[in-house]
Image (spheres, rainbow, N blue to C red):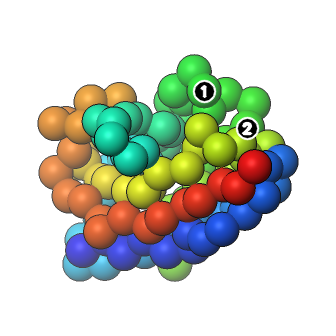
Amino acid sequence: QLQASGGGLVQTGGSLRLSCVISGRTFYSVGWFRQAPGKEREFVIGLNRNGNSILYADFAKGRFTISRDNAKNTVYLQMTSLNPQDTAVYYCAARNSVVPTSQQDDYNYWGQGTLVTVSS
């Protein structure tokens, strides 16, 4: 199971850290996706099992980063310089493979999502 948390309301330019606790099994790679109102879910960022290789969506480069604490079975999404276009439900996902991908269908397990709202 994956349990995402940490969403909330933040002002433009602010920062937020999301957490995803993974229980029940060990996954090789993880990713974060988001779905804005009226839009399709899109890839945000992904991390391999070793935590030394990150895959970014273009909009995430320079603003978002991902990390994992395997001892705590937790993956983090650190977001900075947030703007209203970042408003969305954010989902963590995991897959039984060494490297992350940007394709939703490649992920085997999903968390329930946490809402991030960025006010202008």
**Quarter location, residue 65:** top right
The residue beneath circle 1 is: 59
Crowdedness of circle 1 by 10 Å Cα count: few (<14), some, many (20+)? few
Q: Are circles 1 and 2 on residues that touch, CB within 8 Å?
A: yes
- 68 sits left or right of 81 in the view: left
Secondary-structure class at tag 1: helix
Task: In the rendered structure, find residue 46 and report the number of the disc placed on it.
Answer: none
Give the amino acid at mark 1: Phe
Q: Secondary structure at mark 2?
A: loop
Mark 2, Cα crowd under 10 Å, few <14 / some 14-19 / many 20+, is few
> Which residue is at the front of the view, 16 or 103?
16
Q: Position of residue 107 (x, y in %)?
A: 22, 45
Please determine whether, in this image, residue 118 is positioned above or below residue 58: below
Q: Which residue is mark 2?
A: 63
- Could you tell me which residue is drawn at 36 percent across and 75 percent down? 3
Residue ranking furthest to the top: 58
Give coordinates of residue 84: x percent, y percent.
65, 44
Residue 119 screen position, x and y as percent: 70, 55
Q: Quadrant location of residue 16? A: bottom right
Q: Classify residue 74 as left or right of residue 119.
A: left
**How far apart in space, not on screen, are marks 1 and 2 (Cα)?**
8 Å
Residue 70 visible in this rendered orientation of the protein: no
Residue drawn at the location 79% of the way across and 43% of the way down: 81
Whole-percent x, y for residue 41 in the image: 32, 40
